[in-house]
Every structure is written in C-alpha cells, then in structure tokens.
Image: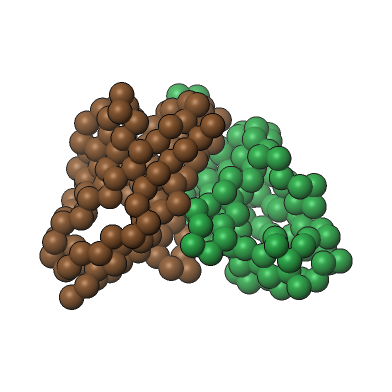
Chain colours: A green, B brown
Amino acid sequence: DTEVTQTPKHLVMGMTNKKSLKCEQHMGHRAMYWYKQKAKKPPELMFVYSYEKLSINESVPSRFSPECPNSSLLNLHLHALQPEDSALYLCASSPRTETNTGELFFGEGSRLTVL
Amino acid sequence: GQNIDQPTEMTATEGAIVQINCTYQTSGFNGLFWYQQHAGEAPTFLSYNVLDGLEEKGRFSSFLSRSKGYSYLLLKELQMKDSASYLCAALTDSWGKFQFGAGTQVVVTP
C-alpha cells in the first residue's frame, strides 16, 4: 500500500463551523505533513509531525489545530475559519529515518471552501 | 531567507526535450527534489539529488550543483501526458522542512 488517503475530498463550511480533515497512511512512514495550496501557487508547509510529535509549526493561526493520534493518522481540526483559508489542503508522509527524510508522498488533497 | 526560482512556463513539442532550471538560496540544504503536479491533482515525486551530478530515471534526469545552488530537470521524448506543473523543492533541514518553488508549467504541443 503506497497511498496516502485523505477525507473528505471536498468540504464546504461556514465561518462558525467546526470540521476536521483526516489523513491516513499505512507505509510505516514516521513523518507526516500538512500543506496548504492555493491555485497556481506552490504548496506551503503548515505542520510537520515526526515520530508522532509536532516538530514544525510554520506560525499557523490557532484556528488550525493538528493532531496525530498514532503513526498512521493525521488530523487537521478547523474552527472559525475565514474565506481566505479556502484552499487545497494536502497531507503528505515521508519515510523519515535518523539519517534520511526521504521524498514526500502526497494524498489527493481536501478542497476546502469557507463561506 | 529562503528563495527558490524556476521559470513560470515552458512550451515544447511532442518528442522534444525540455530542461527546467531551478536556482535556490536556502539557510540549510539536505537535498533537492522534483515533483510533477497535474491540474487538480496532488504532486508526485519524480527525482532527488543530494550529491552533485546527474541522476537518470527513464525519460527524466535531474542534475545538481551544490556550489552553484542550481538544479535542472530534463524531460526527454516529451509526451502529451507530460503537460503539468513541475515543482522544485529544497529540503532545508533534517526535520522535514521542504521549501517549494512556484512551479514551472510545461505545455506539450502536438
């Protein structure tokens, strides 16, 4: 299994809603990532989890809250978002070891629209 | 700061060769990655260089010069399905921090 699975594929939410994006991989990868991508722009790093611990937070607003319940799962909890947060949210994993990060394996993304 | 530059768009005909250049200036460097992204889809990994030189993988090759902060991706025998955005990404630390370039849109014409 070489897939990173993200759900839902599409999400529409109001500014007062609370929702979550989910990501799952069964490749035994020990690093998992959340990226945000706007149209015709490169992916922007949000969070990195390494061995289930948050290792990088790229100064992301607190209305985005990541969670890594175990080595296969990564969630992104959303609350009180703004319309400018509408974007494609990509989850990725990499076969991180002590000496090598390895390439990113991306999921298909969750396309979020905030009304 | 971090800066990764690549051309915005390149056009080539089917069967031709295209070279996409990428220059980078980053505070740390642990390798240079190339990804392909079709419209509306997730990026997929193409190649990786950490040492100077050329890596060849079928129709795709990638080159790195660490002293010059320069890489290129070479696409040979272009096919219509190669029309996509090609992202250059530098791994800037040992924690998994990838910095992406803005992407080069390659358009393959018949």
Pick the front one: A73 or A76: A76
Q: Residue furthest right?
A: A16
Q: Dividing the image into 4 quarters, which one contains the N terminus of chain B?
A: top right
Q: Is residue A24 visible?
A: no
Q: Residue furthest bottom?
A: B110
Count the labels in the image. 0
Residue, x 66% and y 58% (percent of image)?
Answer: A22
The image position of residue B14, as x and y in percent, is: 16, 68
Viewed as shown, does residue B22 lie left or right of B59?
Answer: right
Viewed as shown, does residue A77 lie left or right of B61?
Answer: right
The image position of residue A95, as x and y in percent, is: 47, 38
Residue, x 30% and y 38% (percent of image)?
Answer: B71
The image position of residue B107, as x and y in percent, is: 29, 67
- In terms of image quadrants, where is residue B79? bottom left
Q: Is residue A39 above or below residue B72?
A: below
The image position of residue A20, as x and y in percent, is: 74, 60
- In terms of image quadrants, where is residue B39? bottom left
